[in-house]
């Protein structure tokens, strides 16, 4: 299977495909018919197979269906609906988008930005069942009715850009299809599986792990309007999913509300829970598995890999807390952090395989730095430092950019996170670098206490001092109500000192 269309067309028409809490299900027959309708509208507006269509829609079934259908006819570029006008203008111009899809009647910053560049604006009107919609535009034209091939770009996203200008990552039809198949296989997904999606659908995790992998399996996906810890258990009861995937901060919020939802948990049919996009602290994995009575499968992904690179095995008891799993799709090796060669031991995690982007767009400098040839293959440097254990499981020791250099002593923030997470009063934590006049950098941590628990900065430092070498113990601990997060719910170490007024 090399294109999204090939992944989807093989499934029985009558099976449920896309849904939402409180809505009727769209079947695979509905999805196939919608794909044809979207293609007709796009071609009638002069948009061809290689043209780029930005999608700015709220999370939900229409966003999922818009991605899946547009990607079978053109290149999709989902954007965060929370952006301001100047941000939309930057991304739309950078992407060279030909058109933008927005909700009918929407008159916000994305439309204003698109009009700056004279882009075709296509309005989406939601209908029933969930995920169904019609498209309309004033623009008429004509485009060749070519169907995208395996080598055409299906999805284009920007990297987070925490330290520099965001890079454009084009993902081919074959990259997305390969990754969806890898995830389907590693999670043993079948047509009987139903995913509850709470991940944003402008991000690779939700688009590929939740939506594309579910559809690759012929399963169903119920799309919530975003993550809401207060509504999660109501959705869990109503949708009755066999799995969901989320980032660690979401799992922690779900876990915090578990005691008051014990009956719903008892009746849930969750076959497994999946975590990805940042490291899941070992104690959280264990507590979740005990709470839900189902394996918690941590996976390791990134945009340049069309999401998944490693995954813990699905079989109960084979998940290793603190490890991101076994290679699950691409070949995963350790590279020397400076020289272009593969090594044993600790180094930079590197990948090679059919799910890996062919390279950043219009950025030869980044491609030179991040891709290299070794052992007759092309490898991508992930920017993560890690090592394999004797069983072949990969553990990450930190982002190379995030490793704290305290006067020459290198400290992995992930290691410190793991220790602090063991403190009985700590519900969430993130360790990060703060500037130091003599050492260059020192160690700091932001923590959120569990409901009803108390601890002082001194208590937490004493706890850490008993378990960590003195140079690794955070000099500064901030006890916060909430830790600032990125758009996808991930905790971001880089720039956190500045955000918290410590820069």
Image (cartoon, rainbow, N blue to C red):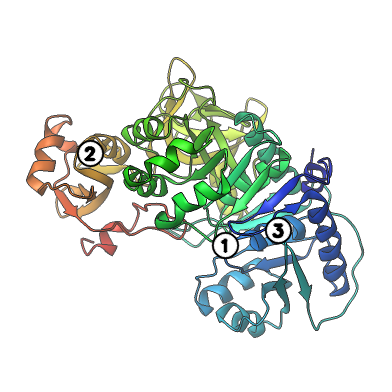
Q: Secondary structure at mark 3?
A: helix
Is any part of residue 406 visible from this angle?
yes
Q: Nearer the viewer, residue 248 or 234?
A: 234
Q: Secondary structure at mark 1?
A: loop
Q: Is disc 3 in contact with disc 1, using a CB cutoff of under 8 Å?
A: no
Real-space Cα separation, disc 1 to disc 2, in angstroms:
33 Å
Is any part of residue 353 visible from this angle?
no
Real-space Cα separation, disc 3 to disc 2, in angstroms:
41 Å
**Which of the marked residues, 3 or 1, is nearer the chain's N terminus?**
1
> Which mark lies nearer to you, 1 or 2?
1
**Which of the marked residues, 1 or 2, is nearer the chain's N terminus?**
1
List the residue tagged with mark 3.
65
Left or right, 426 with reference to 326: left
**Rendered-image quadrant of the N terminus:** top right
**Rendered-image quadrant of the C terminus:** bottom left
Report x, y in % for residue 98: 74, 72
Residue at image position (68%, 57%) is: 24
In the picture shown, does residue 402 fall above or below 287?
Answer: below
Real-space Cα separation, disc 3 to disc 1, in angstroms:
11 Å
Report x, y in % for residue 248: 40, 44
Residue 244 marker: none
Q: Secondary structure at mark 2?
A: helix
Residue 420 marker: 2
Task: Using a 10 Å C-alpha cutoff, classify the residue at mark 1 as few (fewer than 14 neighbours), some (14 to 19) or many (20 or more).
Answer: many
Left or right, 119 with reference to 392: right
Q: Quadrant of residue 479?
A: bottom left
Left or right, 176 with reference to 349: right
In the picture shown, does residue 237 fall above or below 324?
Answer: below
Residue 59 marker: 1
Report x, y in % for residue 159: 53, 55
């Amino acid at each position: 299977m090399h294109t999204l269309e090939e992944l989807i067309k093989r499934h029985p028409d009558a099976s449920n495909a896309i849904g939402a809490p409180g809505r009727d299900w769209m079947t695979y027959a509905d999805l196939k018919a919608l794909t044809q309708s979207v293609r007709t509208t796009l071609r009638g507006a002069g948009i061809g197979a290689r043209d780029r269509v930005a999608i700015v829609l709220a999370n939900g079934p229409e966003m999922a269906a818009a991605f899946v259908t547009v990607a079978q006819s053109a290149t999709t570029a989902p954007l965060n609906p929370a952006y301001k006008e100047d941000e939309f203008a930057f991304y739309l111009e950078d992407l060279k988008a030909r058109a933008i899809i927005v909700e009918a009647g929407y008159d916000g910053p994305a439309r204003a930005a698109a009009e700056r560049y004279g882009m075709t604006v296509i309005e989406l009107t939601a209908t029933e069942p969930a995920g169904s919609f019609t498209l309309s535009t004033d623009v008429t034209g004509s485009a060749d009715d070519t169907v995208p091939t395996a080598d055409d770009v299906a999805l284009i996203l920007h990297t987070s850009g925490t330290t520099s200008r965001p890079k454009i990552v084009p993902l081919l039809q074959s990259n997305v299809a390969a990754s969806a198949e890898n995830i389907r296989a590693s999670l043993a997904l079948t047509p009987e599986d139903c995913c509850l999606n709470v991940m944003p659908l402008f991000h690779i995790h939700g688009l590929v792990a939740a939506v594309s992998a579910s559809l690759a399996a012929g399963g169903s996906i119920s799309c919530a309007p975003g993550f809401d810890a207060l509504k999660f258990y109501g959705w869990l009861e109503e949708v009755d999913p066999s799995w969901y995937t989320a980032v660690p901060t979401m799992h922690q919020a779900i876990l915090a509300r578990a005691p008051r939802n014990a009956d719903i948990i008892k009746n849930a049919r969750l076959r497994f829970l999946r975590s990805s996009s940042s490291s899941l602290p070992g104690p959280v994995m264990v507590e979740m598995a005990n709470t839900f009575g189902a394996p918690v499968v941590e996976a390791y992904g990134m945009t340049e890999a069309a999401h998944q690179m490693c995954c813990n095995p699905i079989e109960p008891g084979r998940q290793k807390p603190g490890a991101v799993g076994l290679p699950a799709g691409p070949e995963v090796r350790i590279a020397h952090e400076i020289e272009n060669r593969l090594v044993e031991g600790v180094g930079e995690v590197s990948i090679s395989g059919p799910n890996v982007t062919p390279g950043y767009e219009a950025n030869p400098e980044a491609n030179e730095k991040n891709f290299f040839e070794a052992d007759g293959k092309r490898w991508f440097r992930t920017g993560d430092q890690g090592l394999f254990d004797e069983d072949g499981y990969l553990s990450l020791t930190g982002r190379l950019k995030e490793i704290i250099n305290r006067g020459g002593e290198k400290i992995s923030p992930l290691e410190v996170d793991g220790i602090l997470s063991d403190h009985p009063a700590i519900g969430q934590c993130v360790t990060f670098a703060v500037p130091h006049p003599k050492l260059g950098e020192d160690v700091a941590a932001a923590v959120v206490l569990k409901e009803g628990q108390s601890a002082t900065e001194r208590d937490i430092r004493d706890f850490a001092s008993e378990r960590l070498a003195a140079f690794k113990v955070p000099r500064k601990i901030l006890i916060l109500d909430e830790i600032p997060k990125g758009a996808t719910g991930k905790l971001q170490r880089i720039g956190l000192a500045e955000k918290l007024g410590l820069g």
